[in-house]
Image (tube, rainbow, N blue to C red):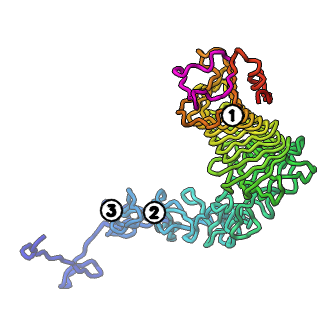
Amino acid sequence: LGDISRLPKLAKVHFIVDSNDKLGFDNIEQSFDHDNINRCKALGFNKTGACGSNQRVSHYCPYDNSYYDQCCDMNFAYSKGECSYPNTISGNSCGGKFKCYCDRSLYPYTSCEAPKVNSSDKCADVTYTNGSAVTNVYYAACVCPSGYRTCGTNQIGLDANGNDGGACSEDGVAKYAGCRCKDGYALTCSEYGPKNPGDFCLIGTKYYKECKTINDVCTEELKNKYPSYNVVQGECGKYEKQVDTCSKDGSFKVCQPTCKSQIAGDSRYGIDSNGFIYSVSSPGTAYVVEDSQIVPLINSNTGSTYTNIYGPDSLKSAASLCGSAGRPTIKVNTTQNQYVLSRSFTGVNLELLNDTYYINSNAYWNDVSYSGKTYLTLRADGSNARINIYSDLTSGRTVSIYATNQAYISLNADTNLSTLSLSGGAQAYVGGGGNNTISSLTVDGGGSKASLSYSKNLNISSASVTNGAVIQADDSGSSGRTYKIGTLYASNYGIFKTNYIKPFYFDNMKLEYRGVVKVGSMGQIRVSGTIYMRKCSRMCTYSGSYESEKGVFYYKNSTASCWPDRNSCAIYYAGNEHWPLPENDFNYSMCHTNKYLGDRWLTKGSGARGKEMCGASYSNDTVTNEHC
């Protein structure tokens, strides 16, 4: 309002009257006559008498307080300035006064059902009943006590007395005075941990319903490392392999099934005391499925001699693990038995610990890898002794074979021998369609025979055939193949014969005392060095006509390479009257005074005597004393 000092000053005057309503200060009697009742009524003060028990007079008439304007409910007792939040001022009034009350839509609660309590947001108002003032308190909400909380997983709620239940629901959430774990959740599992780590009750500490046992711990540890193997407490099953043990308890083991443990349940097979599997229907057949310090010799269950030994791959149809078991290595030592190698082996590794092995029965070695000695001698003796040799045995080692008394040797593709010696009727086959090399071939004695055929390349450094023995080289499919002997020595009815091989190469030939070389009608011989013939030795051909170049000798060297004895009684037998041919056709050498290699030439014209000398046919190996 600013400065009010300049506004007009007004005085308020009070008149003081005496008891007789006289006004003045001079004791002058003055009297006023008032009609107060009517005056009150005129002003609206029409009410007289008492208001109701819960009412009060709004305003009294100033002229007569026995009159008043109206009775107001005593609850209309407040000016607007006297009513503040959280109370609400009424829209209506009485005598200028308003109600100051609590809005029950905002404060609906006067009390709460246990266990809920009143919230701190409250409103108080005063109401009058029969004239008596009553203070009312209202609350905005009923809430759970401040100490109440929700219970977690695997927990049960408690009331204030510690009993189960007594939930206090607030905003759709149940709260409790306290919580406890459900029955059964009482284990801390401090030793091995819980069986189910996610299934717990947390009240300060995690409590579990079930703890791991040592069995659980060890099984988990070992299964994590070896998921496909069995875990047992105690011993592994028969023939299973122990792989590992539990770090916390060694009685728990990882057991790996094996070829042998699988086969043990098959009634078709047995296992002897040495751990060798055998066929029940054929107890002489052994299966070696793991490395062995010994060779299976005798079936300890049946007393049968093991003659056939197979690796695990032969059992894969009966037991799947056998197919993936890998090839075992068997140590072969003659301290076990002199004839330890005298049996058939298939699909195994053999570690050869000796320099010499003896064979007296069938020894068929197929799909076998070898280690051990690099200088090896095999001695086969007797008609039951049979050896099949493959490249795996001879590769990287020096091998010599001595066969006697009707033993039989078979050399297959890509074999390499230092010595092959046949005597006493022993025989050998050299072939297989590969490359075969023999440093020294010796065939001696009647019935002894070496058959050379079906080699891609055959190279023999030196060969000797004596005392009625035979070396025969026939190969009807020899085209593109090479056969060669460095030096051939034939003596004392020893025969070398060849057919279909065109040509068979020789560096040198030495034929003595009825030593014979025979060339069939489809064969050829080429000698690049010296031919030496004496003491009734014979070179025999069985040819049709010279134009076909069959059954002939080719000798292309100088006269100096002839031998000195022109009266050697050596015989050439030609089954063709045109052989020998003129020098300008074949250029074979002449010795001394233009004599040919033999001092007797028996051609077709005198063939009867020649056949007696060489045999009537290529297949007839009779050697007579005729002419000598």
Q: Is residue 407 left or right of residue 102?
A: right
Q: Residues within 10 Å of mark 1 (few under 14, many from 20)?
A: many
Inspect the image, locate mark 2, and give the three-letter code of the amino acid beneath it.
Cys
Name the residue that disc number 2 marks. Answer: 102
Q: Earlier in the sequence, mark 1 or mark 3?
A: 3
Helix, strand, or loop for circle 3?
helix
579 inside magenta stretch: yes
Q: Position of residue 188 (x, y in %)?
A: 68, 71
Residue bearing the label numbered 3: 38
Front of the two marks 2 and 1:
1
Query: Magenta segment: does it hold 289?
Result: no
**Vertical order, 10 against 434 (above or below):** below
Q: Amino acid at mark 3?
A: Asn
Residue 599, position in %: x, y? 66, 28
Q: Name the image quarter holding the N terminus.
A: bottom left
Magenta span covers which residues? Answer: 575-601
At label 3, counting other C-alpha atoms closer than 10 Å, the crowd grade (few under 14, some 14-19, many 20 or more) is some
Taking depth in this image into account, of 172 and 25 the one nearest to the observer is 172
* Residue 320 in view, yes or no: no
Q: Residue at x 78, y 23 (%)?
A: 612
Residue found at x 68% / y 28%: 539
* Amino acid on which disc 1 is placed: Ser
Which residue is painted at 87% across and 45% down in the image? 284
Q: Which residue is denoted by mark 1 in the rendering? A: 568
Q: Earlier in the sequence, mark 2 or mark 1?
A: 2
**From the viewer's perspective, is residue 368 above or below residue 152?**
above
Q: Give x and y (percent) for residue 378.
A: 75, 50
Q: Residue at x 68, y 18 (%)?
A: 603
